[in-house]
Image (cartoon, rainbow, N blue to C red):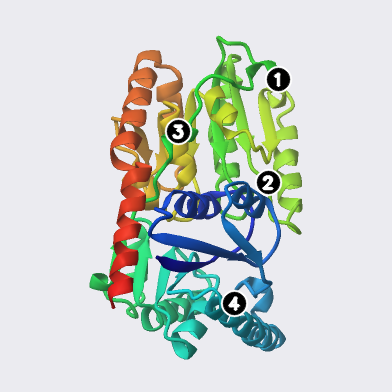
Amino acid sequence: MMNILYLHVGAEMYGSDKVLYQLVTNIDKTKFTPFVVLPEHGKLEQALLEEHINVSVIPYPIMRRSFFSPYGVIRYVYQFLLSSRKLARFARGKKVKLIHVNTIAVLEGVYFKLFTKIPVLWHVHEILIKPRLIYKFTSFLIGHFSDKIVAISKATKRHLVQSKSIKSKDVSVIYNGLDFSKVSIGKNLRAELEIATTDLVVGHVGRVNAWKGQEDFLLACFPLLERNDHIHLILSGNAFRGEEWREKQLKELISKHSDISGRVHYLGYRSDMNAVFNTLDLFVSCSTRPEPFSMVTIEAMAHSCPVVAYDVGGPAEIVLNEVTGKLVKFREINALSQGISDLVLNDSLRTSMGKASEERVKKDFSMEQFISQFEALYQQCQKR
């Protein structure tokens, strides 16, 4: 039996949160025992407890912009040393044989590599572009203080290797997987939102932050709504605590288009994501920075949604152009609008691409593949 300690960035239920949840709930419990330590309480903690996963909350610092100052660095180092000692005691008490760090924003893996003999696997979910100094710094740490490195896409791996601190041969690519047993077709939100069954719904799902592309999505879709009164938009997702002003800005942008705002439905955070995806006829992925992967894209595809996405990052590896959707030039809103229009106005193409999307996810992004690849890596670490 191999005891594994998982360190994560938070306790919500977005992309990397869901990936961690799927990993620890699906690995073979006759071979591996997961111990998840989160820095705070939240939805992820509750979801894991419901699945009888060992979860503890031990506050530890997350690398955020608030630490990017002389005082912030001192505060971070102090918290880092205190929390790392607590985590090391916890790991020794649980006889942990492997540390799985599920983000570049948790640097406690460095402490484990320096001061314990426990192997460290660094699971990279991010493409960090700015600040460049932090990108170079975190890449150096990952390259020098881990035994295994996993990237969630080829784009993520390329970005790590470009730092010059990490060699290509040292990075494995394991695509995130989707548990189809959790995909439920049926219930949708059309009655709740008063959307006719004959109307078309175009959707965007994601954290409301500086780069998930909600504004690009709206600007690309507004002209379509003005020309077609049977099209509705859905946006699902909320902001980080303390950044609620981003949601306010989004609502203000919608309200400026009063003639069509009644067909733009901002849902905020929803726990019933199957119902959200079942409502959509078309999904749009248009982050304004390269997405490392995009769990919501494969979730939408699993619900037979074709996808229009910027041709960059993870979505460019997930979406097969002109087969499961359309890839358009990065940050070209007119091209994004045209791609959406092409599918909105072509029922047969939209249907065929939706079916191809579902098959693509079943074949290439299955939970079985995801779990088996990680279990093989874990066993390699055990033999070292």
Please give left or right for residue 283 compared with residue 54 in the image.
left
Q: Residue at x 41, y 82 (%)?
A: 145
Q: Nearer the viewer, residue 238 or 123?
A: 123
- Residue 39 visible to an observer of this rendering: yes
Bin the neighbour count of mark 1 within 10 Å (Cα to Cα): few under 14, some 14-19, many 20 and up.
Answer: few
- Residue indicated by mark 3: 181
Label 2 close to label 3 by CB (< 8 Å):
no
Please give left or right for residue 210 compared with residue 356 in the image.
right
Give the spatial CA distance, label 4 vs label 3: 34 Å
Give the spatial CA distance, label 1 vs label 4: 47 Å
- Residue indicated by mark 2: 238
Give the spatial CA distance, label 2 vs label 3: 26 Å
Image x and y of residue 262, in percent: 72, 23
Q: Secondary structure at mark 4?
A: helix
- Residue indicated by mark 4: 90
Q: Secondary structure at mark 2?
A: loop
Between discs 4 and 2, the one toward the N terminus: 4
Q: Relative to 231, say whether 303 is above or below.
A: below
